Amino acid sequence: MKELTPTGKLRVGVNLGNFLLVQRNADGSIRGIVPDLAQELARRLGVAAELRQYEKVGDVADGAKKGEWDVAFIGAEPQRAAEIDFTEPYVEIEACYLVPAGSPIKSIAEVDHQGVRIAVAARSAYHLWLERNIKHATLVVGDSIAGSYQRFVEEKLEVLAGLKPKLLEDASKLPGSRILEGNFTAVQQAIGTPKGRPEGAAYLREFAQDAKASGLVAQLIARHGIKGLSVAE
């Protein structure tokens, strides 16, 4: 309790940029899988949840160093693990490539070549993956998911990287565009707490395992009607 609720409340960092896990209501309140899991975690701890909203995932990650939250629902990436202790993932989301109409690129293997420009959302989990793994193509970074789409369209880039459910929406707006078969990675969403809270981290690992094993995560995916999410194994 001292490690997870030092202020007497469970301060939860929530990334509004992940539309699959969090949706915003007209009145500014939020709903979705992450808010529901946060409330369940707070219930088990016997405290109130204080949902701290961030527009971008990078800002959530920065909040660990600033002491702004005690628990966050965020993609588990090696770059973030220097500041955050993560649970096992509770859901996975496919990250894929979209190419415009008439593109000669037919497969994922053809993307990482000289002259190929990939639009990507800044500091997203798949952006961090691409930074580690892309050797020849050029990453063109947008300030958000919407920003990466805008750069892809306006600058006539060769590839747009993104989460498959969002790319399906994007493809419907771009006649002739295609999502390349397969995925280049699967973003693993986990629960994290700032480094230096070993007992809190252990409790969160147990919570994440139970949320999956009990069927809670699957129930929440179904309740909110989210397509493109799967319970992590």
Image (spheres, helix red, strand yellow):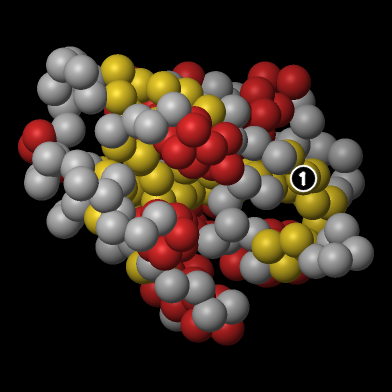
Total number of numbered discs in the rendering: 1
Out of 191 and 95, give the one closest to the viewer: 95
In this view, 217 is above or below 105: below
Q: Is residue 227 left or right of residue 103?
A: right
* Residue sitting at x 13%, y 22%: 113
> Residue 192's image quarter?
top right
Q: Which residue is mark 1?
A: 53
Report whether residue 201 is seen: no
Tell me the quadrant of the picture where the C terminus can be found: bottom left
Q: Which residue is depicted at the point 48% across and 49% down?
A: 190
Residue located at (85% from left, 66% from top): 26
Image coords of residue 197 (percent x, y): 61, 32
Say which of 35 and 215 sits in front. Answer: 35
Residue 109 vertical placement versus 216 (above, below): above
Q: Residues within 10 Å of mark 1 (few under 14, many from 20)?
A: some
Q: Amino acid at mark 1?
A: Gln
Q: Is residue 114 left or right of residue 214?
A: left
Please tell me in which quadrant of the rendered image residue 168 appears: bottom left
Is 172 or 197 nearer to us in this picture? Answer: 172
Q: Is residue 154 shown above or below 204?
A: above
Horizontally, is 216 left or right of 194 in the view?
Answer: left
On the image, the x and y values in percent for residue 228 come to 39, 67
Find numbered disc 1 in the image and state the secondary structure of the residue it sits on: strand
Relative to residue 172, is residue 198 drawn left or right?
right
User: Can residue 218 be seen?
Assistant: yes
- Where residue 96 appears, x then y in whole percent? 29, 48
- The residue sitting at 30% across, 37% down in the picture is 159
